[in-house]
Image (cartoon, rainbow, N blue to C red):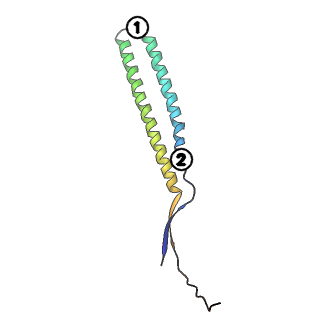
């Protein structure tokens, strides 16, 4: 029995990577707030000295740097996840189809 394999597209493929822009905006806001807090701590301790002040500055710097690393990592992860999401959704919109058919021969009777 003859057959034909083809791909059927239920919907056109679309780029959904724009979805990634919503989450990083929140992360950017949090990073900006962290930078603001770090600047306030630095400004408040500029005119002071001592072991406790030194420790406060070190902790603030360490936490600020760590948050920045996470911030950058989250942006990269969200870009990659948006790409995977787009690929997954577009894969769902396509289906492999195999058509099986019979060939029916029509006989021509007599000539005109």
Residue plotted at (42% across, 28% down): 68
Q: Where is residue 59 in the image (x, y as percent from the top left)?
A: 38, 20
Q: Position of residue 17 (x, y in %)?
A: 52, 43
Residue plotted at (52% across, 28% down): 29
The numbered mark at residue 15 is 2
Residue 38: name its quadrant.
top left
Q: Nearer the viewer, mark 1 or mark 2?
A: 2
Disc nearer the start of the sequence (1/2): 2
Residue plotted at (52% across, 52% down): 89
Residue plotted at (62% across, 91% down): 111
Q: Pointer 2: residues within 10 angstroms few (<14), some, or many (20+)? A: few
Which is more toward the observer, 71 or 63? 71
Which is more toward the observer, 36 or 99? 99
User: What is the tally of numbered marks visible in this picture?
Assistant: 2
Which is more toward the observer, 83 or 60? 83
Give the labeled residue for mark 1. Answer: 48
Q: Where is residue 46 in the image (x, y as percent from the top left)?
A: 42, 10
């Amino acid at each position: 029995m003859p057959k034909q394999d083809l791909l059927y597209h239920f919907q056109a493929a679309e780029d959904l990577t724009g979805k990634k822009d919503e989450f990083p905006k929140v992360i950017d806001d949090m990073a900006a707030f962290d930078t603001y807090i770090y600047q306030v701590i630095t400004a408040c301790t500029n005119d002071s000295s001592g072991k406790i002040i030194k420790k406060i500055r070190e902790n603030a710097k360490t936490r600020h740097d760590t948050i920045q690393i996470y911030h950058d990592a989250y942006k990269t992860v969200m870009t990659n996840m948006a790409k995977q999401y787009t690929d997954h959704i577009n894969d769902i919109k396509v289906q492999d189809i195999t058509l099986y058919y019979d060939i029916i021969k029509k006989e021509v009777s007599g000539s005109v």
